[in-house]
Amino acid sequence: MLRLHALSDVADPGSRAIIYESVILRIARAHENFIEKTFLSYLVGDRTDTGGVVGTFVRPKDLKHARKLVSSSTGARFLDWSDVSEVRARCEVFFEEDSPLYEAAGVKSAELSWMKKIRNQAAHDSVESRLSYSKALETILLTVPAPVPSAGNLLQMTPRKGPMKNHEVLSFFIDSVRQFAHVAAGVAPI
């Protein structure tokens, strides 16, 4: 909805870029919350959307206990649900083979990694985020343009070649997150 507003009602390119950056931040946050909720739900025995059972190696008594188990296993101050490789590693520890969440993270790992790099660039302009962002630009656009576009400007682009050929970058990520959610929920096959 916000993206459509930016496209139809916002004439200023700088304002539109800010809106697009806001959209990717919100999408990333919602996606990370979905992963955490789905992971913990499967861990306490909730079924997939199609009624499938996800085999686990532990049986926590409730969601709070499940979160405590997962948190204590990492030794980290917070659980990072934005790193696809960390999510997959967590799945390997807690779930039996072929959990839908593990499969979704594998199928969409590249796209989610690119999205994280763009989100990080929108959120903080650090040396590390700029380096990762440049790598994502090169993968998405098959080049690093000069001058380097802001995250908001990149999200508005429709590359003519590369993995997002003829798709607006933000729309591509929206579709990727939707596809991830369908596979993770056990709705869509891989």
Image (cartoon, rainbow, N blue to C red):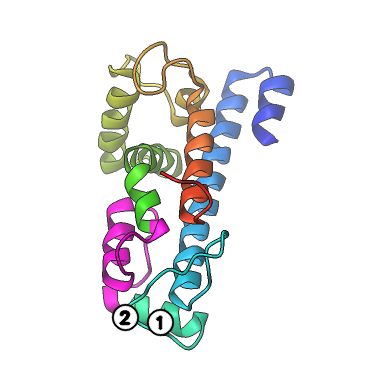
- Where 63 sits versus 159, above or below? below
- Where 83 sits versus 78, above or below? above
Q: Nearer the viewer, residue 69 or 178?
A: 178
**Res 76 seen here:** no
- Residue at 32% across / 65% down in the picture? 91
Residue 158: give x, y in percent of width and height: 48, 17
Q: Is residue 24 magenta?
A: no
Question: What SS does tag 2 mark?
Answer: helix
**Res 117 seen here:** yes
Residue 174: give x, y in percent of width and height: 53, 37
- Residue at 43% across / 41% down in the picture? 119
Mark 1 burial class by Cα count in 10 Å: few <14, some 14-19, many 20+: few
> Which of the numbered marks, if any, corresponds to residue 72?
2
Residue placed farthest to the right in the image? Answer: 9
Tag 1 residue: 68
Q: The magenta stretch spans which residues? A: 73-101
Q: Nearer the viewer, residue 94 or 174?
A: 94
Disc 2 to disc 1, how far (Cα)?
A: 6 Å
Quadrant in the picture for the C terminus: top left
Quadrant in the picture for the N terminus: top right
Is 14 situated left or right of 43 in this image?
right
Label 2 with label 1: CB-CB less than 8 Å: yes
Looking at numbered disc 2 in the image, what kind of residue is underneath it? Ser
